[in-house]
Amino acid sequence: FASRVPEIANAPNASARKKMIEQLENEDPALYVTFLADRRKAEGESQFIRLSGRYPLCGRGDVNTYTIFAESMRIVIGARGKVGCIVPSGIASDDTTKYFFQNIMDTKTLFSLYDFENRKGIFPAVDSRMKFCLLTLTGSGDPATIGAEFVFFAHKVEDLKDEERIFTLSAEDIALLNPNTRTCPIFRSKRDAELCKAIYRRVPILIKEGPPEENPWGIKFLRMLDMSNDSKLFRTREQLEDLGLLLDGNVFRHGSETYLPLYEAKMLHQYDHRWATYDGDNTHDVTLAQKCDKEQVSLPRYWVPHQEVMSRIPSGYGSTNQWLMGFRDITNTTNERTAIFSILSLAAVGHNFPLVFMMSKNIPLSFYANANSFALDYIARQKVGGTHLTYFYLKQLPFCSQEVFRVNPTWIKEPLQDWIATRVLELIYVTNDIAAFAREHGYDGPPFSWDEERRFKIRCELDAAFFHLYEIERNDVDYIMETFPIIKRKDEGKNGNFRTKELILEIFDQMQLSIESGKPYISILDPLPGYSSMSIY
């Protein structure tokens, strides 16, 4: 439709597009018939690929042509032959190609995979962000017995000669790092590969798929509202005001009618449910002055009926909780942060911010802090192959077990979960609209002040603690922090040095001395987080 009826191609959502297409039957019958023929052809090809039996490994999910050709090449190769091809790097990391990748690893028929970013314009007509790989497969009579050779994030052919970038992974390594999907992690160097393997030997993944499933946190995921398919439920500010509803904060009310704000992922960030706000059809960052205002809330583009939101929340959760936790689906390994979790008051939420529910009454704040730690983010950056932090990536990230947070370590004066919770709550509870969350976690005082310097120190303390909980050595902590170049660049521009890394290492060292001496760690914060009036559990 882009060249024939641009209005249809540019429709605001799927619902509107469907109506416009249906109208063609009367308004332009010839174009409508052409559309039906194209649709039948596409659906017929899809059916053949999925049901013919010709492509048992790649003929599933969202079928992409390159995966079909890759499987065809593997089928026709001779027992002692080899085949090399250039395909998108998703052949090793996407969920839809996991069966193909698992098979070539298990049968030792993957010889090598060299991943490139097109930033140097190797293919001038292709977007510079495009990722492709040189995939080499070998026949069953000449297997890669010690594992396949990998290089990731190469920009030029000469990068393939850099010994620090070349590493080998076996099927057993893949099973350790991605036990659910058996897809390939994306390491930038041999050091990353060895460091991640060591972490995975110590720390369990979030959810191990079964049967039987191992889900110790009792987690349930939910995509609440699809921004296209559910758009018929959305109302604008003008529409609601015309109906006589009044805006209270960011909620519209009138009598028994209530419309909740529809949050999109770009409005939320780590420890900040007011990252951005809408002004008409455009978003802008919430200013520091606004963040210091405890009444300030973010305004959305749309609102959704309260009862519609409640109907989508899992049974047993919505009756007692007035807040939600979720994470940004749209992300990238080259962004400032890759894993971005946020907590917000009860609201409608778009599909690009999947929700995480724990069926216990009180969500462990330790889990939330773990999810936003540099330690976990470093691992996430080795796993995400595209621009989406999907469920299958998240399930396979290593999270500290609940038992770790329940113990009383020698290096602090209180139970670890309490030590973490007081810090997390002070970071989150900075506005009145999140008061229900604070009360549920044992604090009924006023919101905490938004103090940039104090918040920075709290987060550094949390990150230093999680590096210890992951049992990561000091020199590796230093190395991991250097893999966050945007944070380093911002720090150096503002402070002249990589202050985030330096303070985390300073606190890490103090904690290490406490671990070795048995004397409690003394916080750098004054007053202590949460103040003396807080009782968390």
Image (cartoon, grey):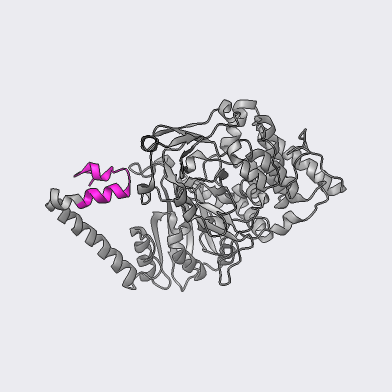
Range shown magenta: 1-22
Q: Is residue 21 magenta?
A: yes
Q: Is residue 337 magenta?
A: no
Q: Residue at x 26, y 60 (%)?
A: 42
Q: Decide which of 143, 387 is in the foreground and name it.
A: 387
Residue at 66% from the left image edge and 56% from the top image edge? 199
Q: Measuring from the top left, give residue 310's x and y in whole percent.
A: 49, 52
Q: Is residue 246 above or below residue 155?
A: above
The quadrant in which residue 38 appears is bottom left
Q: Can residue 163 be spotted in the picture?
A: no
Task: Name the one closer to the observer, 383 or 325.
Answer: 325
Frontmost residue, 114 versus 491: 491
Seen in the picture, residue 283 relative to 183 is either above or below; the reply is: above
Q: Nearer the viewer, residue 156 or 94?
A: 94
**In the rendered view, does 122 fall on the left or right side of 504?**
left
- Choose top left, top right, bottom left or bottom right for residue 456: top right
Residue 431, percent from left and from top:
60, 35
Left or right, 97 with respect to 333, comes to left
Q: Report the residue at 52% width, 49% height from top.
A: 161
